[in-house]
Amino acid sequence: MNKVSTLSEIPVRGLGPIVDVAGCFKFQEPVFFRYHVLFHHFILVEEGRVSAETPLGKFEAHAGEILCLRPAEWSQYVTAPNTMTYQAQIAFAAAPLDRATPVLPGLGLLPIHTKLGTHWESVRRTFDLICHELPQNSLPSQMRWKAGVFQLLEEIAAAALGETSEYEHDALERYRLLLTSVAGEPPTVAGFAREMGVSRQHFCRVFRQRFGVSPQNYRIVARLNDALRRLRTGRDSVKSIAYSLGFSGAKGLTRALQTHLGLSSSEARRHKEKLPELSQAMLDSYVLNQHILPPGKSYEDLMERYAPLEKRPKS
């Protein structure tokens, strides 16, 4: 009688790589952290400066650079004033290899400090994808953020080796830039999709996967960003601002302000010094200064694992 072998099973969520926590954080004042590094701690600097010290030495990253602090009993870093970072704690394999450092072909061990150069935008988009997809509970979302981790490694390796980014002329990125431009109306989604040789539905789907929102919403938020800047000055009427930005009229702009920001145009003018900035994190549909966790994880779990060894303002 033939024996039926029993295969071990592992859920998709347990497959490597594993992102334990991610997020976009802005520090207005210098902040010092000393903590136990469970997995690889990636810190992408968008603005300002981060100075880190680990058992392997001291490292400093400026805007357009990334740190990958390896698992260690301790690590510490301090932020300069007005520093914005994207961060993620990543294990590249399940236990017992969850603290192992990847070896990249042609490069060796994953570098601790990398100047990204032209790869900066691609790495940033990868963090956007991870932050957007990580809290989702669907299988496609899990597969997308796991693929994003491999893309992150690819971009870091290419930057460290001095290779040209294959994403520089990415069609989706070109369309995103057109959406943020105020110089006339961008091409329609259908027209741009035809240029790419894909359907409108497919283009909208991959645009949302890349940037977290639809092309229409991305365009609305970009126009509102410009409208807020002009409302602050008080020089132009709501009607003239609305027409110059492609809204149907003053009512269209007012409706968009109310829908997306909860503000009327008069409130925008009256409290112009307190208007919220439309940060890039808002464009990418996740919240600034909030730890983004995978499904099933709680903030209490996070604090238990990453309780700082020391946290104090740095003078």
Image: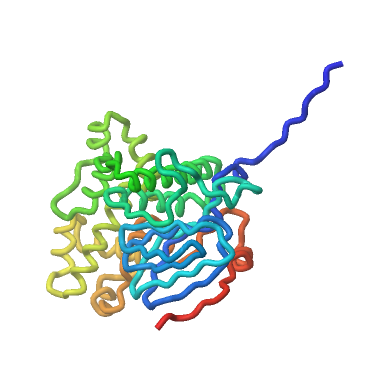
Q: Residue furthest right?
A: 1
Q: Which quadrant holds the C terminus?
A: bottom left
Is residue 221 visible to the viewer in this orientation of the structure?
yes
Going 40% across and 64% down the picture, which residue do you hit? 59
Q: Residue furthest bottom?
A: 315
On the image, the x and y values in percent for residue 309 come to 57, 73
* Position above or below: 201 against 58: above
104 vs 19, left or right, is left
Image-quadrant location for residue 250: bottom left
Image-quadrant location for residue 1: top right
On the image, the x and y values in percent for residue 290 come to 48, 65
The residue closer to the viewer here, 82 or 162, is: 162
230 vs 199, left or right, is left
143 vs 238, left or right, is right
Is residue 259 visible to the viewer in this orientation of the structure?
no
Going 48% across and 46% down the picture, which residue do you hit? 145
